[in-house]
Amino acid sequence: MAGPSNPKTLNKALLLLPSQSHFKPKSSASFSSALTNDDDFQDPSPSQARLPKPTSKIASSKPFGPYNSASPRTSKKPKQHSPYGGKENLDVAGKCTEDLDLGHGLDSSRPTKKPKQQPVSAEKDCLASVVVEKSDETGKILTSIQQNSETDFEDLDLCHGLDSIESTIDCCSGAQRTTNQEELKRGYLFKSIEARLLNSNGGFEERKEEESEQCSELDLLLKLCGEEDEVDVDSLTADSHRQEECLGLDNEYGLICCPLCGADISDLSGEMRQVHTNECLDKEETPTDVITANNDVSFQCPGQVLNDSPCQSPKDVVLVSPVVEWLRNLGLAKYEEIFVREEVDWDTLKSLTEEDLFSIGVTALGPRKKILNSILELRKETAEEKVARQDVKKIVSVDAGTKPSKLITDYFICPVSERKKVCATDRAQMDAGRSCSNTPCKRNQKRNLAKSAKSKDIPVWCSIPGTPFRVDAFKYLRRDCSHWFLSHFHLDHYQGLTKSFCHGKIYCSSITAKLVNLKIGIPWDMIQVLPINQKINIAGIDVTCFDANHCPGSLIILFEPPNGKAVLHTGDFRFCEEMTRNSILQTCGVHTLILDTTYCDPQYDFPKQEAVIQFVIESIQTETFNSKTLFLIGSYTIGKERLFVEVARALQKKVYITASKLSILECLGFTREEMQFFTLNEQESQIHVVPMWTLASFKRLKYVSNQYAGRYSLIVAFSPTGWSFGKGKKKSTGSRWQQGTIIRYEVPYSEHSSFSELKEFVKFVSPVNIIPSVNNHGPESSSAMVSRLLD
DNA sequence: GCGATCAGCT
DNA sequence: CACAGCTGATCGC
């Protein structure tokens, strides 16, 4: 493995852009000359033919805002609230029109929600010291991070008689460290473009080489670490579940055994037992009847003698005793007070989780495990009773066709409170399974097929091996999971999440949490906010989140299950150098990397965001003296904010946003200063932030143009997307399109990693196993992507 | 009538 | 091609 960064690779893209004459912002003269030519495209490119031809329908369309996302063809209802109109406005405006004054700009006296910014713990990481110990005898290198005294020093035992080298992150950051810390202080997202651009010039390159020198020792260490975990290309695409091995716990008081491998799993939480057993099941393909036939459920392993431990007889424990009596039976009378205070009744008791116990004050490991074990028994018994009363066939038919692990799932039953609810989604899935034969409509059959497929196949990149967790898997809601992580608030990741969600807890960043609450209506008590750069424990598994540098609130999540095989899920991310300086990422030793492979192809080697931002700034700057030019900057629901915020900052101009956009921006942790860059008064700015699809076609742009016919004579639109740097557009940093008085730039502003960034990240993480999460249509495409990354 | 979901579209 | 999203139609409750 090479060092954390390769200066040449990093700067290649940056150097590309300024010299591209093709992509240089046109001067005012160029824009003006455009005005004299009324004909269609002046600057055609190979894919021009794909653009829709302008039609005459536009003029006759119903009233809707110039930036309405609806096409003129489909817009039927006049929903106008502002020039932007449309559903987007109604969605949020419906909730907040009263406190949004569309006629005025951003009134500083208006109470604006100002969410606290994410804790800037990356800074802390920069300061964390690194202790590097080197063994002359074994050649083994161990890097351990001292941070918050939470460091696990267990591994240090592996090294003895070592020459200790103490170094700090400084060795890696050098002169840049100060800059980085200052930048971080300004919040994670919006760094000074000026500072960044300075870095992107020669100074940056020189500094990079310097760093490279200084880091050579660290590079060597990392390289050696990498060699310990050599990548086995053959195994890269293997089913991640199969790679999990059963833990052979050596516990002389073994209370509960895995029914498959025989390992003592009494130390694991209920969910972890479920995970363990599921994995054994997947691995060994043990006949399921071993489990299901055993209605009198015990934790006996096949061929094993049941442990006769006194505290594991559920029937003894239950005895219709009240909670206090139950506690006393467990020898945990000292917790009576807590349980009484928290009003834990018998039903509540059965739904308690490890986190609950922690939060009410049962923090000691021993009692906690004892209680959990016993609760598990209680649940099991309740489930048995329920199953005996119910029509078993019905349940079996629902599960028919699912993997054997489904049956094991029932073995380690979910909390009672959750099972009691029959969720809409589950009902839908059950219906889908039942009603195939009685739906004559072709479309219904199709839909049902899709649904039953959905209920079966959870993509490998949504399940975290070794844990009971799912990531961005709301399309695959199932009752066998109660921990649902959401990496960021983009539709393709939260799809399936509705306000009727009742499958457990949602884990996400604070920004995402606000949006999930605001836009979907998920109540706060179903959301757990995850801190950044701080290890926490969820259901017995260490979880650490990092800023993914994708959209605001996006996370990279590190899972460290008890089996020692760490899983790093990138969600959607754009690699940046700061990631390589993160001490936790440097040392966690990733086994499985679930990777955002959106641009996993060498053709996608677009420039750094800073360079693109600078291009847009310069383009606007050259023309802003002309008050009859309207600038449009495309944006997603969330995403691409940095572009227009930096434009506003550099030009010291406000940008116009819609009310709905404002309500979203208010969730994103902008500073008061940054919020001042936005205005709801379209008269106040000639720079407008609009939904991306407004810029998608000239048809729509022409509609905008017509709406502003009196006020603006030229429209310059910036469509920021990584796809502008794709097939047929090689080595171009973007493309320019023109139709009459409308100019559209497709600028390669990407919030996903470029191909070279992906490679660099993979080198840095050095995982044993890679699972592509995008464009992964099966083993073939998956292994193709992986080999490209390792090439 | 409403929410959820899908196909079709950009 | 398809980032991430919008729309109307349809279905079930």
Image (spheres, coloured by chain):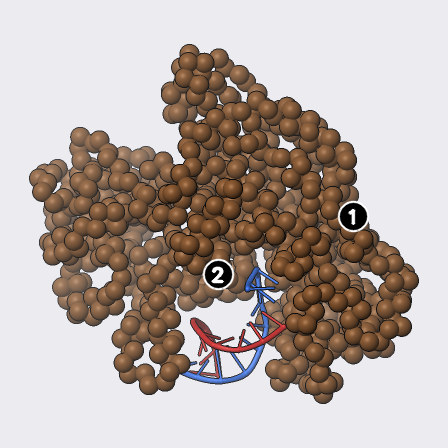
Chain colours: A brown, B red, C blue
Q: Nearer the viewer, residue A76 or A345?
A: A76
Q: Position of residue A535 (x, y in %)?
A: 46, 38
Residue drawn at (79%, 48%) of the image: A19
**Would residue A310 be found to the left or right of residue A57 on screen?**
left
Residue at the disc numbered 1: A18
Of labels 2 and 1, the one closer to you? 1
Q: Is residue A217 above or below residue A188?
A: above
- Residue at the spot 22% in from the left edge and 53% down from the top edge: A408
Residue A356 x, y percent position in the rendering: 35, 47
Subunit of label 2? A
Give the residue at x 64% y 28%. A212
Q: Earlier in the sequence, mark 2 or mark 1?
A: 1
Amino acid of disc 2? Tyr
> Can residue A710 be seen by looking at this rendering?
yes
How many callouts does the rendering have?
A: 2
For residue A88, side relative to residue A674 (left or right): left
Does residue A458 lie above or below A70 as drawn? above
**Residue A582 position in % (x across, y down):** 55, 35
Front-lying residue, A472 or A329: A472
Q: Which labelled disc corresponds to residue A201?
A: none
Q: Residues within 10 Å of mark 1 (few under 14, many from 20)?
A: some
Can residue A322 be seen in the rendering of this structure?
no
**What residue is rendered at 57% in x and 31% in y?**
A3
Find residue A637 and report its horizontal and vertical position in percent: 61, 63
Amino acid type, callout 1 = Pro
The answer to whether residue A534 is above or below residue A474 is: above
Q: Provide the residue designation for mark 2.
A: A494
CA separation, marks 2 and 1?
38 Å
Circle 1 SS class: loop
Chain designation of label 1: A
- Callout 2 secondary element: helix
